[in-house]
Image (cartoon, rainbow, N blue to C red):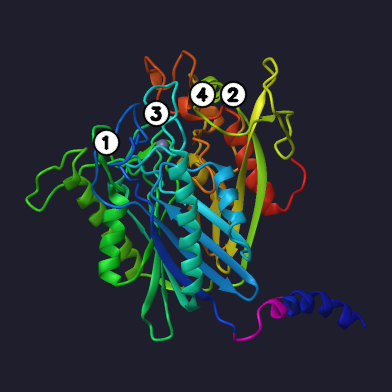
Amino acid sequence: MRFYLLILPLLLPFTLLLADAPPGEALQVGFAETDITPKVEKKTVYMAGFGHNRKATGVHDKLKARAVVLAHGKEKIALVAVDLVGLFHPQVESVRKKLPGFTYVLVSSTHNHEGPDTLGLWGPSPFQSGVDAVYLDEVEKQIVSAVQAADAARKPASARIGKANAPELLHDAREPFVKHDELIALVFRDKDEKPIGSIVQWNCHPETLGDKNTQISGDFVGYAVEALRTKYRCPVVYLTGTVGGLMTSLHVEIKNAAGEALKDGTFEKTARYGELLAETAERALKAAKPLKLTPLQAKKRIVYLPLDNKLFLLARQLGVLKREAFRWTGDPYKAEAIREIQGDKPLCTRSEVAWLRLGDLDIAAIPGEIYPELVLDKVQTPADPGADFPDAAVEPAIYKQLRGPHRMIIGLANDEIGYIVPKRQWDEKAPFCYGRKKAQYGEVNSLGPNTAPLLCRAFQDLVRGNRSP
Ligand SMILES: [Zn+2]
């Protein structure tokens, strides 16, 4: 009897697992992509990421929605990356409604700064949105088509995973200087060892073409994907990870074959950066090891984050930022939608964190531009005395929560809430950190100083299975 009591709890999860996925059932994987390039000749297309009123004058290279679908037993997960500056959570939820039958659909933006405004912040003036609603609808349709095509292309697959570091491909534009310089690459092969597709995850703003370019482009992402597609003869999904704090391709020294430094804002530098990134991915794949990706599990949590940023509040009032607001009550897991703004009662925004546990691979899905310090557990300690909240607690780091043999982060996942800044590195008020005469760039594009503590805590709660905040 004692024996049975001991063995029963051990057998139970095992039998449940078998019921979900019959023995011998293999992981199935499919890839597909669709075109989401805006039509610049018919309407004015406002380009996102830098200043206002940057009108597109042409298309240099096409923007894509790239999808991979993984299926095992009854579980089916889609990961999609779009060559856009960001998409808001309600749009992702709208995409999900059109894709029944999936355990989880994740839509992430590469954070492309050379594509159309999809958030509203880069219109003709600060008082006008740059979003074309008709185009956004088309993007939704194309994301759905990409996922359906990837689903239809599924076949039994084996996976390998590799990593490579490339600090030389990142410039950190904000102190403290902490880079997330690890590239993750996965390759999937069919039973004949033919590549089905590849996933590459890297941590950098695609903005090499800068703020003067008026040609629609996927920036270095497009070049890296094309180089890898040519090399491995398979589709590639590029996922953006940790891009806050501030990981950029601008000011990264890149030389041509003749040893001459290539300038920011040129297609030469952007192309070369993409090739070097593809070479880094090849390096990762050469050293890749077999990866067990089953069973597939996805857990998500809705999180409400206070909207403290006065510019965002103003943009909301002006109709530049179109997004449902909620009443902030102090509980990150509960809030009521509001129809009308009443006085100065605090508002919050509804977002989502997710944890995908795919066999031996843990994936953190974070809804914005997180600082590397918060991912790698490198928040400045002690805080700079110039910081606005030097005594704020260090947030629970994202990667510290992930205990599997392999881990990866997807940034701008299912939302773009802006910068996620460690609270003790928040610095808007004088005196400024590091003896600076003015504040560093970042806070202006963040919901507020409590975003990081609430979000990191929500991710920790999600992984630990905690119910209450
Ligand atoms: Zn950014």
Q: Is residue 169 magenta?
A: no
Left or right: where 288 falls relative to 266: right
- Which residue position is annotated with label 2? 308
- Which residue position is annotated with label 3? 123
Magenta stretch, residue numbers = 17-24
Cα distance, mark 2 to mark 1? 29 Å
Closer to the chain start, of discs 3 and 4, is 3
- Which class describes the residues within 10 Å of circle 1: few (<14), some (14-19), or many (20+)? some
**Residue 408: percent from left, percent from top:** 49, 56
Nearer mark to the viewer, of 3 and 4 = 3
Rendered-image quarter of ligand 1: top left
Closer to the chain start, of discs 2 and 1, is 1
Q: Amino acid at mark 2?
A: Asp
Task: State the image quarter where residue 198 is shown.
Answer: bottom left
Q: Residue at x 51, y 52 (%)?
A: 107
Q: Amino acid at mark 3?
A: Gly
Q: Are marks 4 and 2 in contact (CB under 8 Å)?
A: no
Q: Which mark is residue 315?
A: 4
- Which residue position is annotated with label 1? 210
Cα distance, mark 3 to mark 2? 22 Å
